[in-house]
Image (tube, rainbow, N blue to C red):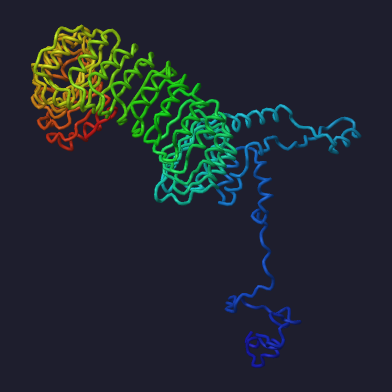
Amino acid sequence: MSKVFDFTDVDKFCPGGFLPSKKDSSSFLSLGNHVDVYFLPRKRSRICAPFVVSEEPKQQPSIEVLPDECLFEIFRRLPDGQGRSASACVSKRWLMLLSSIRRDELCTAKVPQFTEPKIQSNPQKANDSAVPNEKCEFDDSAEKKSEDEEFVKTDSYGYLSRCLEGKKATDVRLAAIAVGTASRGGLGKLSIRGSTSTRKLTSLGFKAISRGCPSLRVLSLWNLSSLGDEGLYEVASGCHSLEKLDLSCCPAITDKGLIAIAMNCPNLMSVTLESCSNIGNESLKALGRCCPNLKCITIKNCPRIGDQGIASLFSSAGHIMTKAKLQALNISDVSLAVIGHYGSAMTDLALVGLQNVNERGFWVMGKGQGLQKLKSLSITACPGASDLGLEVVGKGCRDLKLFALRKCPHVSDNGIVSFAKAAESLESLQLEECHRITQCGVFGVLTNCGEKLKALALANCSSVQDLGFKFPSMSPCYSLCSLTIHNCPGFGDAGLGMIGRLCPKLTQLDLSGIQGVTDAGVLPLIQNSEAGLVKVSLSGCVNLTDNAVTAIAKLHGETLELLNLDGCNYITDMSLMAIARNCWVLSELDVSQCGITDSGIAVLAAAEQITLQMLSLAGCSLVSDKSFPFLLLLGKTLVGLNIQHCRGLSSGTIDLLLDQIWRCDILS
């Protein structure tokens, strides 16, 4: 053995040595003829030389190398909407391609497949059946069912609603909406509220909507300064089912875009144009000429719209239009004359801020005798409205039931009384900031509308104040059931006493903000009410005491459903005691900023006959943590509880209330 390892001549053992020379690379790890020699296992040597690739790797086949035309043909053959939605998530390119496919371009039918050959006894027939014939066999019932399901998904009317605001309003999101909603009933309503950050919205997004959402019915675009006519062109080309269009603060949209909508959307029923500086008379002409179903029009602050556009619109569509609102427009008496003559189907009309309309315009509108079906008329901030004009309007609108007059400084007592006499069907009268109307006008209206007027509302009328003389005997107004007087500081106890004698059938009473009213004025009004008060709001009547509330509870407790005493500082627990004893059907109670304590809440909670749903204790500083168990009892029926600014309630108690009566909406 020693002879085996005892050697000095390496070449005799391994010719050429252990490592071959660079010149003789063929002898690397080659033992030649010495095949019987045994080698112990050795570690593999680490190769530090750089890895050199002799050939370029073959690229993996990818669908991305296909042109858009091929991908388009693939995508439109996807079997269902889920597959198209999943494909849209791959890349922006795929999303845009999918959004460019119209619904009628989708291939809903499946490709016929061969059936499995049947084994027959005759081998010749078996061989024949194994060869596919020219006519393929497939399950006809399954194919028919698949087509029906696809029809339900893609051809149903749009019911989904989407709203994009600010930065979310981009072309990519509109494309995603178009692809995602196509298989779920279709998009029915789209609202976009722009802002200064809305910069990435172009006609490309609306192109996706027009192709993928042909069932779109409502489109609202607000504050989109960069969007022009191209977007409306796309909508007009694909969304022929559009019924309502709302454009607000879109200065880049001109007559061309709106004309395209009018010519391609015959189902259009409602149009709103607000602060669109480049939309003018030509748009209104197209709407009147091309939209046979147009019933509602609202135009506000569009400086390029004048008498020519209004006249063309109403002369063409006045016989079908039922609602119209014209605000802050450069129109004159001519427009009101056309409305009064052609508005034969008009039921609701609002005229706001028409500075160039004079008394003659209202006079001619009433003389036109075309507003025979008008039921609601609102006139706001129109200096041309006068006593004579209102009287003629009242005679010409015989079916008028609701009339609202706001901020018209030239209308006096004579005008409003003459109007009330002429309007034979008047049921509701609202007067706001009409400073020439006094108590004489109010009582004159009540006297002359004793058999028809049901609701009277006065707000911010500074001249409506108590007068120093007594009124002669007047006929009572048995029809009036609702009286609202807001923030008329001159209205006091004498006026309320007179109304109490004139209106014995009141069921709703709202005297909010009348600080001069005391118990002496409220008590006669309450005592003379024969029908039973249902809703009473005395918010802001700071001089009322428990005597008035007690009288309300005793006399009208069986009918009272709502009582608002917000800000009545002199109301204490005595009022809650009277309410607990007498008010059986009360559902809403507001005693915010009153002198209510824990004892009053305890009495209220102990009344088993009361099932309050809304209770407000906001600003009641005397309510403390001791009221916690009583609030829990009340919480069994409450759906709303307001305990804001109740400094006596700790945060721990509020947390417990939130946890215990979680069904109730608590404001804290």
- In-front residue for pair 354/268: 354
Q: Find residue 460 and report its image quarter.
A: top left
Q: Please state, as top left, top right, bottom left or bottom right, where the N terminus lies in the image.
A: bottom right
Q: Nearer the viewer, residue 220 or 600?
A: 220
Residue at the front extreme, as displayed: 360
* Total marks placed: 0
Where residue 495 appears, as percent x and y from the top left, is: 14, 17
Q: Which residue lies furthest to the right in this view?
A: 124
Residue at 33% over, 33% down: 353
Residue 411 can be seen, yes or no: yes
> Viewed as shown, does residue 532 lie left or right of 279?
left
* Residue 26 versus residue 433 in the image, above or below: below
Q: Where is residue 38 in the image (x, y as percent from the top left)?
A: 67, 78
The quadrant the C terminus occupies is: top left
Task: Give coordinates of residue 254: x percent, y percent.
Answer: 50, 43
Residue 538 locus on image (x, y percent)? 17, 22
Q: Which residue is drawn at 32% across and 30% down?
A: 382
Q: In the rendered view, does 328 fall on the left or right side of 59? A: left
The residue lying at 33 percent from left, 26 percent from top is 359
Query: Which residue sits furthest bottom?
Result: 8
Residue 584, located in which quarter of the rendered image?
A: top left
Camera-side residue of 345 and 369: 369
**From where the camera sits, is residue 179 visible?**
no
- Residue 644 or 104: which is nearer the viewer? 104
